[in-house]
Image: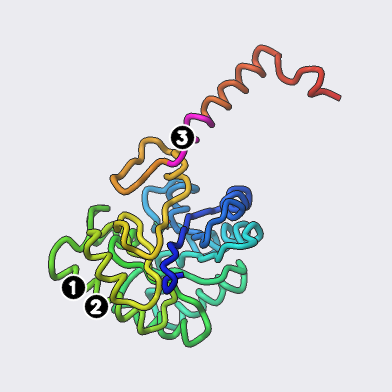
Amino acid sequence: MKAAGEKIAMLTSYDFTLARLVDEAGIDMILVGDSASNVVCGNLYTLPITVDEMIFLAKGVVRAAEHALVVCDMPFGSYQVSEEEAVRNAIRILKESGCDAVKLEGGEEILPAIRHMVQSGVPVMGHLGLTPQSVNQFGGYGLRAKEEAEAEKLLHDAKLLDAAGCFCITLEKIPAALAEKVTKAVSCPVIGIGAGNACDGQVLVLHDMLGLNQGFKPKFLRHFANLGEEVKNAVSTYVTAVKDSSFPNQEESY
Ligand code: KIV
């Protein structure tokens, strides 16, 4: 698709029902993101989610996806300790969830693990820029690689990931001009989130783009629906109908 200039559309999903709708709507790739830690589990950060929890979520998504390629995030702590542990966890995720590939955050520092995974037959997606698993080092979720030195390191890392055999790279929250430079410099597709329009594709967190959490509206996010309001209206209408005994009616009864 990169070679053909066809843009790649990716979204996250974390359960069977929504993943089936996302797949039927024609998405190219589904990410079972560790953002599940936030949007599914209600944690402030992505750090607490575990390999077991990611596998549990990914299984439902894999059952739903008939067309899309399913990528599962490797959670914090599952690939940083040693190459062996990284490969063991990646293989566990592929075997037990049935997903097609894994994604992990970082550049040169995790290159040995990435090489080992690729050599073991695990398709790997890289993730550079704002890497939420490192939020405690960054001290927040601000724009990354604004300064020359960090931008140069990011470009260098992207080239290393590409050469190591990553089939794709996610770039999160970096200047659009840098994302364009990276996209042109690597042979694998680059998927952006808050990284401008020159990437080979885009990814968003499903719950965010559906407007399920209206309070979360960073600059890069577009609400493609207002489901938060719809869900609240539906639920309050249901509550009223139960309380005034208009639900269920005769047609809804046996
Ligand atoms: O976990 C996630 O949802 C992600 C996307 C933001 C790319 O990594």
Distance from the alpha carbon under mark 1 to that under mark 2: 6 Å
Amino acid type, residue under disc 3 in the picture: Asn
Check if mark 1's residue and mark 2's residue have beta carbons within 8 Å. Answer: yes
For ligand 1, which image quadrant applies?
A: bottom left
Tell me which segment is drawn in magenta. 224-231
Image: 166 above or below 211: below
Amino acid type, residue under disc 1 in the picture: Glu
Badge 1 residue CB within 8 Å of ligand 1: no
Along the horizontal axis of the image, is 138 left or right of 24?
left
Along the horizontal axis of the image, is 231 left or right of 248?
left
Nearer to the camera, 200 or 121: 200
Residue behind mark 2: 156
Residue 69, label in figure: none
Mark 1 residue crowding within 10 angstroms, few (<14) / some (14–19) / many (20+)? few
Closer to the chain start, of discs 3 and 2, is 2
Is residue 80 visible to us here?
yes
Check if mark 3's residue and mark 1's residue have beta carbons within 8 Å. Answer: no
Nearer to the camera, 115 or 48: 115
Name which quarter of the figure residue 164 lies in.
bottom left
Q: How is the image coloured?
A: rainbow
User: Residue 119: where, in percent of width, then height?
Assistant: 47, 87
Residue behind mark 1: 152
Q: Residue at x 27, y 53 (%)?
A: 141
Q: Residue at x 43, y 49 (%)?
A: 38
Distance from the alpha carbon under mark 3 to that under mark 1: 39 Å
